[in-house]
Image: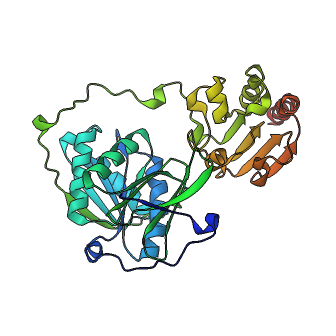
């Protein structure tokens, strides 16, 4: 097994003192890497979030933080490298090749594994996006190392190992996973789980050019066309400033319209808890929680949601959480900033009317 699960001290009452020296061959592996996701010249924000988290890990280990950028446009890669420096990277590895114009599992896996085998980082982080998940699994398999997917917390333990925490057993428990016997230690983190770090304008660092060894004729897959997500009608929950969500406490699919009406007045996105997807009340792209979307809005209104750990993990990064539930003992009140013990079916229409009136007054005053 590449991975070992240990209980996280803060959640499972500590662990026995098993401190031991790392194997001698591990000493060649140094530094923390973030594989930067670039698609059509745009850097995915999760890469900057990971650089912020990677900076903490690198500082704890006393090593460099490096970013890996891959593509075919040298100018775009240079701009991405500059941004990576400003978000905390000390070094950027640039792999530029015509075969990397579009993401393909085969080419990206080959280049990233070659980079890892050449420079030997001890930690490799990727975003848990569709692209990142695809790449991370292939790279971990090729390198024969462990991978902790959808991590919600990253830390360095007293033995110098990466401690990656994630929900398990359907989101009912949190476990911390260690890759003890293999390197690099790999983890993926979903967008918006980690806070965006502050940008240090003008910060620079070291650039390492890497020449990929790719023969296009030997690559099986070909990209015929590209359809951008932004052109679709799917929800943009992870990046919304205001989100309104509903749970089973609404009582029926018909009552879920109250969530949509409030969201419309506020100019917000709307979503719901996992049971609503299972019942068919909402589509999967509007599910909020560990197995759905992770959000970090300025305001999150949760109506009729109990707040199990699976949901908590997906929303606790919100600036303000307002919870509405008839049960005063509901778990959501443990982490909500404002709790209202009330029937959401009765309260939501009142909130919608009140916000609508306030917005009308503000518009007239301006």
Q: Residue furthest top?
A: 254
Q: Is residue 232 left or right of residue 133?
A: right
The image quarter containing residue 175 is bottom right
Relative vertical location of residue 298 with respect to residue 154 in this rendering, above or below: above
Where is residue 169? Give x, y as percent: 57, 47
x 63%, y 69%: residue: 13
User: How many numbered marks have been drawn onto this rendered protein structure?
Assistant: 0
Residue 201 seen anywhere in this rendered image of the structure: no
Q: Nearer the viewer, residue 49 or 283?
A: 283
Q: Nearer the viewer, residue 70 or 199?
A: 70
Determine if residue 147 is in view: yes
Question: x and y percent of residue 206 in the render?
Answer: 30, 67
337 shown above or below 131:
below
Residue that appears at 81% across and 33% down: 359
Of residue 152 and residue 204, the one placed in the foreground of this image is 152
Vertical order, 24 against 313 (above or below)? below
Q: Quadrant of the C terminus?
A: top right
In the image, taking residue 135 as reference, residue 18 lies left or right, namely right
Query: Which image quarter holds the N terminus?
Result: bottom left
Q: Is residue 29 above or below residue 82?
A: below
- In-image side of 95 versus 11 (left or right): left
Is residue 224 shown left or right of residue 273? Answer: left
Residue 17 locus on image (x, y percent): 51, 79
Which residue appears at 46% of the width and 68% of the height? 57
- Where is residue 271? Give x, y as percent: 65, 33
């Amino acid at each position: 097994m590449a991975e070992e699960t240990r209980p996280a001290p803060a959640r499972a009452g500590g662990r026995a003192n098993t401190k031991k020296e790392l194997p001698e061959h591990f000493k060649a592996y140094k530094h923390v890497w973030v594989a930067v996701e670039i698609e059509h010249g745009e850097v995915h924000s999760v890469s900057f979030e990971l650089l912020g988290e990677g900076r903490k890990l690198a500082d704890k280990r006393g090593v460099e933080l490096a970013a890996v950028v891959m593509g075919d446009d040298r100018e775009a890669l240079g701009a991405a490298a500059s941004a990576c420096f400003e978000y905390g990277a000390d070094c950027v590895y640039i792999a530029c090749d015509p075969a990397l114009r579009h993401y393909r599992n085969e080419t990206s896996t080959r280049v990233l594994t070659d980079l890892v085998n050449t420079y030997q980082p001890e930690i490799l982080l990727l975003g848990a996006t569709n692209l990142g998940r695809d790449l991370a699994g292939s790279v971990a398999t090729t390198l024969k190392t462990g991978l902790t997917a959808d991590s919600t917390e990253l830390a360095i333990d007293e033995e110098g190992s990466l401690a990656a925490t994630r929900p398990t057993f359907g989101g009912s428990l949190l476990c911390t996973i260690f890759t003890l016997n293999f390197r690099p230690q790999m983890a993926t983190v979903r967008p918006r789980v980690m806070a965006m770090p502050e940008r240090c304008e003008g910060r620079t660092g070291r650039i390492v050019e890497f020449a990929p060894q790719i023969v296009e004729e030997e690559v099986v897959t070909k990209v015929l066309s590209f359809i951008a997500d932004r052109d679709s009608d799917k929800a943009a929950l992870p990046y919304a400033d205001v989100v309104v969500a509903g749970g089973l406490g609404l009582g029926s699919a018909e009552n879920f319209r109250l969530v949509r009406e409030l969201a419309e007045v506020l100019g917000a996105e709307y979503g719901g808890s996992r049971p609503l997807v299972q019942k068919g009340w909402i589509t999967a792209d509007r599910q909020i929680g560990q197995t759905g979307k992770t959000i970090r809005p300025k305001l999150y209104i949760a109506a009729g949601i109990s707040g199990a750990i699976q949901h908590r993990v997906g929303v606790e990064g919100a600036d303000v959480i307002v919870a509405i539930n008839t049960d005063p003992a509901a778990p959501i009140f443990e982490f909500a900033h404002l709790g209202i013990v009330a029937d959401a079916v009765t309260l939501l229409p009142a909130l919608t009317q009140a916000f609508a009136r306030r917005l009308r007054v503000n518009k007239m005053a301006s």
